Each structure stands twice: as C-alpha cells, then as structure tokens.
C-alpha cells in the first residue's frame, strides 16, 4: 500500500533525513531495529521499501494551513511518524503479528525485547524532537502527541479486550478505532498548526477532520482485511477472518438481526482452525449480513463529515484541496 | 526492601496523591494494572505494600537544593517515579521475571500486553505531568527525563545482549549499570533543580552525585542478589546466580586471573540447570575469585565519589546531609 501522491512523495523525502538523524542518536541496537522497521535496511543492513508517509504528509499540510514554512513543520512531521512506528513495533509484538509492510515484522528478526525497546526509544525521541525546538508551540505539540499516545494505548487495550468477548457492539468497535487509528491521524492533521503556534480553533477543526478521515481509513482498512488482495495488504487474503479479528464489518454483521449474522457467529465460535472454505463462507456471510454494505456506507458518511470539518477551517484553497484529496485517497478501497 | 528514612516517608505521602491523580486519567485497563503495580490494590482491588519512593525523595530534595517549595517539586518527583514504574513493568516482561516487590509481577496477573501498555501509558503521563506545568523548567525537566529514558533503553538492550555473551568485561558491565540504574537516579537528583529553573551547574553537580550513588546502589543490589536474604530481596536466595545473571561481582570474578574465576566460568557454562549445591559453590567461587571484595570496595569508591560531587554543589547544610544520608543508605548492604 504505497501512497503515490506528489505531496506524500515530497513529505517522505523531506522528513526522512530528520528521522534518520533522530534514529542516529539511539543506542546501536535500537538504531538497528529502527532502520530495519523503517525499511532503510534489511536485517543484513541493505535498504528496502519504506512506509507510506501518510502522517508526515498530513503534518506538513497542517503546518502549511497555519502559514508555516515546510522546513519548520518537519520535526512535528517526524515526531508523528516516530509515534506511529512505536505503535506498530509494539502492536506487532502484542498481537503476535509476523508480517509488517510485506516483510517479517521487526520482532521476528530481532526478538520481542529489542522490538519493544526500539519502540520505547522512538516514542521518547518523538517528544524530544518537539521539545528541542525550545518554543511554546513545540511544548504544546508534545502535549498533543502525549494525548494521542494515551489514546493509542487505550485503543490497543480495548482491541485486546475485544478478542476475548463475543458481545462487542458496533459503537464499542468504533470507539476502539477512534482511539487506535483516528487519534494519531487527528494529531497529524493538527500538530503542524500547534507546533507553529497557530490558532487553537484551526487546530481543533483539523483534528476533527483527522478523526473523521481516520475512521474512514479504518473502515477501508477493515474492508481490505477481508476483501483486499495480498498485493494490496501484504497479508494473506481473508487475513482478518483467519485471526477472527473483531473488525468493523464483522461486528456490524454479528450485531445485526440477520440469519447470516447468526451463522457467522457460529462459524467464528468454532474451536478448531478455520479452513479456506470456512474463510470464504465467513466472508460471504459478512456480506449477506450487511457488514460490507454498512462499512462502505459508514466510510462514505465519515468522509462527508471530514469534508464538513474542512469547511469550519479557514484554509488556503490549495491546502484544503490537498487535505480533501488525501482523505478521499485513504478512504478509497483500492489503494 | 523498604526505605524507613523520614524524608522518604514524607516524600511518599506527598507524591502518592499526585501519582494517583495521574493514574486516574488513564483508560480503565491501564489504570487497573498501574494501581496493582504501585501496590495500591491487589488484582482483586485491595491495597497492599508499595514501593520505597527513593526516586521521588531524591527529586524533592533536588528541588529543595534549588530553594523550591516542596509542593512545586511534586510533579517532577511523580514523573520520575512514573518512569521507574514504566521500566519495571517492561523489564519484568522482557526478562520473564515473575516477582516484583515480593508480589507476582503485573504481567503474571494481567498478561504481557496489558503490562506493556500500562508501562507506555505511565511513560507518557510522566512527560505530561512536567509539560502541563507550562513553565520553561517543566519543558527542560521533560527533556532531562527523555535523556534518562533513552539511557534506560540502551542499558536494557546491553543487559539483554550480555546474557548471550561470555566475554563481558567489568567496564562494559559498569557502563550497562550506568545506563540502566544510574541514569534515572541522576535524573531524580537533578530534576528538581531543572524543573524549578535553578542553575545548570547545580543540576550537573547533583546529576554527577546521582550517577555515582546509582552505581554504588547497583553494586549493593548485585551483592544482595547473591548474598541477600529472601526477606531483603523478595526473591529466592542466590537469585542472580540461578538466572546466571552477569552481575558486577560475577563479571569481576569471571574476568579476574584466578583459578576460582575459571571454575566459576565452567560451572555457569553448564547446559543443565544448576542445583542448590551448584549455586552455593558458585557463590563461594565468586567470593574466592575476589568478585565480592571488588564489588564492596567499588561501592565504597563510588560513594566517596558521590560525596565529592556534593562538595561541588553549593547546598544548604540540611539538604546536603539528607543527600549524603540517602546515598549511604542505598549503598549499604543491609537495607
């Protein structure tokens, strides 16, 4: 899943040197894990892919919304990406997830402790990049990032709790997505304004935009987790059904009043591993129970809400157009 | 191991409400783990023991060194304790250590993911307590804490690396202890000055004091890990030999030129589990090889160096006396 927008390409090129310099400050073991995770090196030291730089792109746009020079937005953009990396490194350990960005997850290469330590180091570096600016905006941005991290933690805690429950509601599932996915995107969309000392009203409007766009993103991601190709997701087809993840389309199907939903619940409650045929049945039942249609419609509603949030912000026309473009891009199901 | 000094009692009573308020901001699952870890509740919710509040005591003293009101030092004192809690929660997961403060470690009660998430939340709260002061001193203190956290990460990474190596030198082992133990104590000893906007020279002198006192502390702790009673350590006797930990007395014994050191190396290299008799032999060999005497002498040297650092700081007589008392207390082997 590579973002091919010009804005993202530009942000990635600008932010990567800041990230590399920051990672260079770490102890050698954590730096090695970080370089692997960011795709700058494989476990033997050679370079490979890399992330899609969505959050840095949003952070740079956010700074531009407040009239800040792009250069001045880069520490905030890098900080958000460092927090994202921290959360991926830790979540993969907690979820036992062996694949990240089409490659073996860092913990499978370096061991769980070193992946966790690297995550802790990146989280700490994120705050440091903001505070070392020595500006009130930098400190305010660090606080905004703290709030997002506490939200990420709450979201991951809920996600883990939901795995052991069979009565998760759609509202609970949306709340979890708001914490786990939307909060950091909301922070990315507003942190440039905050770091530049821009108006709180603008930061709030962009954070609200980021929350709605983030939910649309999660809905799209959950749809991909069932119906996406391996090429698009870097995971086996039907990946989320294999792990019986309580994703939004699945929960919508399970909590609806349909016979298909009840059959899906029975299927997912079976103690034995699901066969390929079971998985295809499960995907069909999610669709028959209306889970797919609801998730697609809800993603559209969230995208509309995000667009309305942009109307509340007094944005330069080019910045508004880019925010909108990005929101549509991440909520589309074919990236 | 409970600190029974009046200063520590006072600091614990003053800091605990700040810690409780901070923990009360967390998501319910992380808050539950934190309350258990701090000894405010067992896994059913009832209260039990608690930590020894060494770091908050040092932080409050540090503030007093800069002439700050005790009340104004409490966020910094709480922040250091939160970082300490974060590192214990994570290290116990990474080290597979099932006991903490005479009780089952949090991860054995709530599972590894929730212990990790709680640690992340506490680390984030620590920075937030400092930044929400909205003062330049608060931001500077947050940066000092970031530096200590990066050092903790580096120390834990080295500690893990050393487990797989049989050629660790005494200098490497001291470096690891400086990162893993002394850095946060150095931060505790100086953060009150920094948070109060006191002179950098005073903060530096107290950080140097904390580094030396921290090494003395680690040496004392390593001696307890071999010769301490279960009552003193909360762990089985000979605990560090059971896990073949490369503690300072062991590394000193292994790297010396003695026959006892060579016999110790052979014993610890055996693939099979060590019997109680093996463990007693190992303790005797550490002593015969000079590991115990070196560690005791080195602790004394570090304590002397710590005392000299206090002379570099222009401290009120009562504050100086309390710092010295604390350093002697933590470096003594019978606490």
Image (spheres, coloured by chain):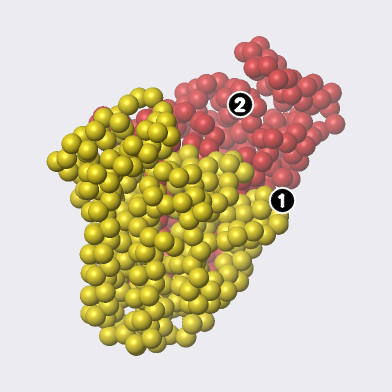
Chain colours: A yellow, B red
Pointer 1 indicates a residue of which chain? A
Query: Where residue B237 sits: x, y (%)?
Result: 55, 21
Q: Residue at x 36, y 81 (%)?
A: A321
Q: Residue at x 56, y 76 (%)?
A: A14
The image shows residue B284, relative to residue B78, as above or below, that is above
* Tags 2 and 1 on a common chain: no
In the image shown, does B273 or A233 lie closer to the viewer?
A233
**Residue B199 appears in the picture as rendered:** no
Total marks in image: 2
Whether residue B1 sits left or right of residue B286 in the image: it is left
Residue at the spot of label 1: A44
Query: Where residue B204 sits: x, y (%)?
Result: 57, 64
Query: Where residue B36 sits: x, y (%)?
Result: 33, 36
Whether residue A13 sits left or right of residue A141 in the image: it is right
Whether residue B282 sits left or right of residue A329 in the image: it is right
Q: Residue at x 64, y 59 (%)?
A: A48
Residue at the spot of label 2: B243
In the image shown, does B331 or A189 lie closer to the viewer?
A189
Query: Where residue B67 sits: x, y (%)?
Result: 41, 66
| Image quarter of residue B110 | top left
The image shows residue B259, relative to residue A254, as above or below, that is above
Secondary element at image label 2: loop
Secondary element at image label 1: loop
Say which quadrant the N terminus of chain B sits in.
Answer: top left
Q: Give the Cα separation between the discs numbered 2 and 1.
A: 31 Å
Q: Residue at x 43, y 43 (%)?
A: A239
**Residue A44 appears in the picture as rendered:** yes
Hey, which residue is sitting farthest left in the picture?
A257
Of tags 2 and 1, the one toward the viewer is 1
The image shows residue B121, relative to residue A64, as above or below, that is above
The image shows residue B103, relative to residue A202, as above or below, that is above
In the image shown, does B61 or A321 lie closer to the viewer?
A321
């Amino acid at each position: 899943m590579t973002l091919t927008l010009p804005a993202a390409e530009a942000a990635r090129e600008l932010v990567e040197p800041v990230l590399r310099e920051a990672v260079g400050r770490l102890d050698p073991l954590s730096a090695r894990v970080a370089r692997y995770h960011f795709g700058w090196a494989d476990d033997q030291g050679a370079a490979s892919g890399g992330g899609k730089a969505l959050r840095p792109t949003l952070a740079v746009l956010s700074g531009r919304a407040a009239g800040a020079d792009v250069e001045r937005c880069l520490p905030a953009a890098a900080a958000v990406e460092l927090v994202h990396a921290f959360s991926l490194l830790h979540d993969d350990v907690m979820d036992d997830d062996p694949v990240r960005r089409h490659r073996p997850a860092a913990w499978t290469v370096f061991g769980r402790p070193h992946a966790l330590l690297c995550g802790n180091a990146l989280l700490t570096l994120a705050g440091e990049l903001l505070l070392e600016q020595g500006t009130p905006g930098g400190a305010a941005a660090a606080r905004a990032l703290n709030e997002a991290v506490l939200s990420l933690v709450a979201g991951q805690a809920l996600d883990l709790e939901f795995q052991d429950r069979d009565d998760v509601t759609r509202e609970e599932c949306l709340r979890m997505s708001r914490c786990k996915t939307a909060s950091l995107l909301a922070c990315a969309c507003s942190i440039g304004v905050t770091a530049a000392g821009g108006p709180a009203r603008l930061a709030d409007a962009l954070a609200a935009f980021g929350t709605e766009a983030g939910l649309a993103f999660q809905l799209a991601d959950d749809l991909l987790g069932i119906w996406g190709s391996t090429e698009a997701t870097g995971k086996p087809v039907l990946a989320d059904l294999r792990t019986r993840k309580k994703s939004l389309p699945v929960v919508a199907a399970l909590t609806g009043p349909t016979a298909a939903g009840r059959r899906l619940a029975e299927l997912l409650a079976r103690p034995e591993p699901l066969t390929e045929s079971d998985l295809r049945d499960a995907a069909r039942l999610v669709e028959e129970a209306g889970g797919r249609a609801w998730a697609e419609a809800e993603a559209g509603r969230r995208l509309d809400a995000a667009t309305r949030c942009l109307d509340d912000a007094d944005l330069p026309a080019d910045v508004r157009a880019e925010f909108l473009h990005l929101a549509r891009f991440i909520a589309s199901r074919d990236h």
